[in-house]
Amino acid sequence: AQSVAQPEDQVNVAEGNPLTVKCTYSVSGNPYLFWYVQYPNRGLQFLLKYITGDNLVKGSYGFEAEFNKSQTSFHLKKPSALVSDSALYFCAVRINNNDMRFGAGTRLTVKP
Amino acid sequence: DTEVTQTPKHLVMGMTNKKSLKCEQHMGHRAMYWYKQKAKKPPELMFVYSYEKLSINESVPSRFSPECPNSSLLNLHLHALQPEDSALYLCASSQDGKGRYQETQYFGPGTRLLVL
């Protein structure tokens, strides 16, 4: 089945340090992968997506993600974390024309 | 502009009430979606409309009734809900949902529903 997994429920980093939020995928065929962020009591905001091409995808708010086919991973990264990056992050995979399946989510906490 | 708006922001209703959630987008998108999200869980797809026609119904109970009156509007009519239906209901839209795996779905802020 087409799915994504986020192995970490919680990630804690200090402000100014690099951050990584992990995502692995299980997809037959070409993967179409997305990252979204959700702030408290808000909807999901699109960060970036991988369709094809360069393995390093750059997105909003200084985030980027690295697609690794051999490791079936699509980890979200940021060189220098901000306190305001604290939120819930979802990895997602498009499984057909309309349906998108989300990972369980990773709560990122950036401490001053 | 990638804005999807939803009203109301919060809704409290009894199990015998009838209410409606509204969603609107003006991005010219022809696919619109309803998701349900329980606390600390990922969104779960409920319905998909493509070109104002219902294309996916993920076995949602009939007490939830979607409606797409035009290409910009999406409603979710609620009747005889149960307390376990309390959740954040998210609306999303994308370009047209027809064979475009790379389409981005843009989400609204959601309606937080409490069923008493």
Image (cartoon, helix red, strand yellow):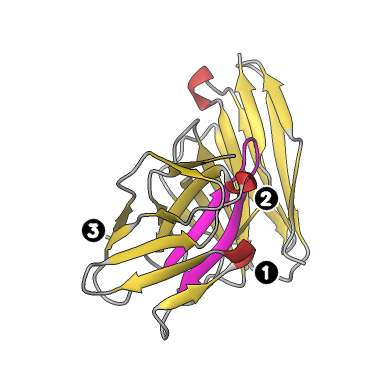
- A87 displayed left or right of A53: right
Q: Which residue is mark 3?
A: A1
Residue at 63% in and 62% down: A61
Q: Find out whether residue A49 is within the magenta segment.
A: yes
State which quadrant residue A69 falls in: bottom left
| Front one among A94 and B53 | A94
| Front one among B1 and A109 | A109
Region in magenta = A33-50
Q: Are marks 1 and 2 in contact (CB under 8 Å)?
A: no
Q: Are marks 3 and 1 in contact (CB under 8 Å)?
A: no
For the residue labelled by badge 1, is the local secondary structure a helix, a strand or a loop? loop
Label of residue A52 in the image: none
Q: Are labels 1 and 2 on one chain?
A: yes
Residue at 46% in and 61% down: A77
- A101 displayed left or right of B18: left
Secondary structure mostly taken by the magenta-highlighted segment of the chain: strand
State which quadrant residue B86 falls in: top right
The disc labelled 3 sits on which kind of residue?
Ala
Q: Label 3 vs label 1: CA separation? A: 28 Å
Q: Quadrant of the N terminus of chain B?
A: bottom right
Above or below B115: residue B90: below
Q: Which residue is mark 1?
A: B29
The disc labelled 2 sits on which kind of residue?
Gly
Q: Are labels 2 and 3 on one chain?
A: no
Pointer 2 indicates a residue of which chain? B
Pointer 3 indicates a residue of which chain? A
- In x, y percent, where is residue A47? 57, 62
Residue at 67% in and 69% down: B29
The disc labelled 1 sits on which kind of residue?
His
